[in-house]
Image (cartoon, helix red, strand yellow):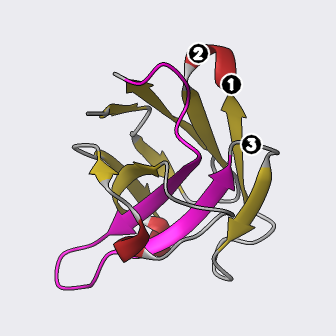
């Protein structure tokens, strides 16, 4: 069993930056793939960024490419999502997800087994 705990959500002005963190506890090593998803009321949850922790390969949604960066600290079983140039449409509940059944970074929701409780990001114009 893997427990994921997110932190770092906040309210910011458009153009600002935030760094989210997700720490995995339970396993002896960081899960093979970890990712960030987001959801706003009335919309489906969408994948934002993912990292294959074996080699650091990352994958991003087109909507965040060039603005968001996912990184990992294997010693701390933690992944980070640095979000720059934030826009009001980035507002949402951000969830961390993890799986050890992957061979590369994926932002498909069904690929993930473990989920955190979420951290709220609000970007005002």
* Neighbour tally class for label 3: few under 14, some 14-19, many 20 plus, Cα within 10 Å: some
Q: x, y percentage for residue 55?
A: 82, 45
Q: Is 85 located above or below residue 116 in the figure?
A: below
Alpha-carbon span between mark 2 and mark 1: 5 Å
Q: x, y percentage for residue 73?
A: 68, 25
Residue found 69% across the figure and 64% down from its top: 104
Indicate whether residue 49 is drawn in magenta: yes
Chain-order first, disc 2 or disc 3: 3
**Mark 2 = which residue?**
76
Q: Is 115 located above or below residue 75 in the figure?
A: below
- Report whether residue 87 is seen: no
Left/right of residue 94 with respect to residue 107 in the rendered view? left
Q: Residue 67 falls in which quadrant of the image? A: bottom right
Q: Is mark 2 in CB contact (under 8 Å) with mark 1?
A: yes
Q: Is 25 located above or below residue 103 in the figure?
A: above
Task: Find numbered disc 1 in the image and state the secondary structure of the residue it sits on.
Answer: strand
Q: x, y percentage for residue 44?
A: 27, 83
**Mark 3 = which residue?**
54
- Report whether residue 42 is seen: yes
User: Which residue is more in the foreground, 100 or 24?
Assistant: 100
Residue found 67% across the figure and 24% down from its top: 74
Quadrant where the N terminus sits is top left
Point out the stretch of residues depicted in magenta.
27-52
Left/right of residue 87 with respect to residue 51 in the rendered view? left
Alpha-carbon span between mark 2 and mark 3: 14 Å
Chain-order first, disc 3 or disc 1: 3
Q: Residue 3 falls in which quadrant of the image? A: top left
């Amino acid at each position: 069993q893997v427990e994921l705990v997110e932190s770092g959500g906040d309210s910011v002005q458009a153009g600002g930056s935030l760094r989210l963190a997700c720490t995995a506890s339970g396993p002896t090593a960081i899960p093979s793939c970890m990712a960030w998803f987001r959801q706003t009321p009335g919309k489906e949850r969408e994948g934002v960024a993912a990292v294959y922790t074996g080699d650091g390969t990352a994958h991003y949604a087109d909507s965040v490419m060039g603005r968001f960066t996912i990184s990992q600290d294997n010693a701390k079983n933690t992944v980070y999502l640095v979000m720059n140039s934030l826009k009001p449409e980035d507002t949402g509940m951000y969830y961390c997800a993890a799986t050890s059944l992957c061979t590369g970074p994926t932002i498909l929701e069904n690929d993930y087994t473990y989920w955190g409780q979420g951290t709220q990001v609000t970007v005002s114009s």
